[in-house]
Amino acid sequence: MFVRIVPNKFLVIVASLLIVAVGCNKKSNFITIDSTALGTFVQVKCKTTLPPEEIHSIIEEIDSQAKASMSIFDPNSLLSAINRNEQDGADEHIIYNIALAEKLSQISNGAYDITIKPLTDAWGFGREKGERREPNIDSLLAFIGHDKLSIEGNRVIKQDPRIQIDLNSIAKGYVVDMVAERLESLGIVDYMINIGGELRCKGKNPRDAKWTIGIETPYDGNMEMDSFEKIISIDNVAVATSGNYRRFYINEEGQKIVHTIDPRTGYSVVSTLLSATVVAKECALADAAATMFMALGSDEALEVAERYEAEFDWMYYFIFADGEGYRVECSEEFRE
């Protein structure tokens, strides 16, 4: 795994990932494809002799597969049918992601939990935006819990029929991995894939250098595209960031309700952890782990990140609120 820190001129702070400008393509066989998948933007840059239309078709094909399997918004998806208890047979995509989620649920003592869908819906963070009122938490917690969900062969076993599975915290990263595997099967070894800010890069960029990315500044409602806390160069790894500074609302009492819900309590996480960036070999892991760390919050995230760093082969970059400023805790590789 290669990660090289490029020194920054000043300290700015961030949470999802954007590609730092790499300039004009200097090689004619580098192509850029802009598309959509899972309801968000997609950009793929790769060195290939294939026409852009073929790469675009691959993205569309994978997007269709992912939606048909894992979408909680498409009533015709396999996951929607499982959530409605119309069937329990799962495909390879659902089985893989439930298994990965269970590993993170175990090491986080349930802070990461894909059965959280009833809570996120009740708090108003689902796709349907109804009136936002504090839900009856106790009634919902009765059927929340990763220990109430298991896989037997290709069957999804739910201990309570009211259990609802939500794979959104893994899906973007997983689709990034699907695209990467397809590109590599075509002999493409220089590429960057960005789906909704979840990234995977390999080889060289159009300037014949490592791919360069930045970690954004995490302040409320930040939509800026040009302020970075860290600039890093990466090769053959994936990067994902989670933060609460874009998705939140203010309730009638003036309290800030962030979209990260702790499934152990049923309530919005109260934490000084503003953003969690994870670098890993697979984007599905990076995506899910970043969400897990935000759910763990300032009291537990750093401990879990350090304890399991070698086992999961990840690196982390956490930004905490600290008085009027910020504090960074990170893997050794990120320290200047």
Image (spheres, rainbow, N blue to C red):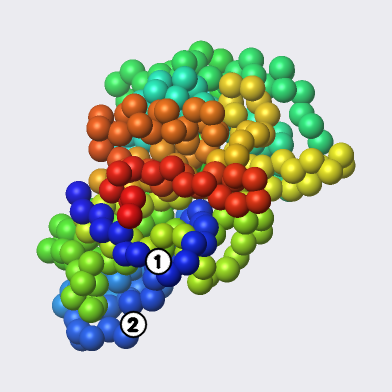
* One can see residue 107 in this view: yes
Residue 332 at x, y = what percent? 30, 44
Residue 238 at x, y = what percent? 31, 52
Residue type pointed to by label 1: Asn
Q: Which mark is residue 298?
A: none
Q: Which mark is residue 23?
A: 2
Query: Which residue is pictured at 87% across the width and 39% down the height?
Result: 253
Residue type pointed to by label 2: Gly
Q: Can you say whether 314 is above or below 84 in the image?
A: below
Specify whether 17 is left or right of 131: left
Q: Which mark is residue 8?
A: 1
Viewer-proximal residue, 263 or 306?
Answer: 306
The reply to whether discs 1 and 2 touch (Cβ–Cβ < 8 Å) is no
Residue 184 at x, y = what percent? 17, 58
Q: Can you say whether 141 is above or below 66 in the image?
A: above
Query: Which residue is pictured at 33% across the width and 82% down the height?
Result: 23
Viewer-proximal residue, 29 or 264?
Answer: 264
* One can see residue 170 in this view: no
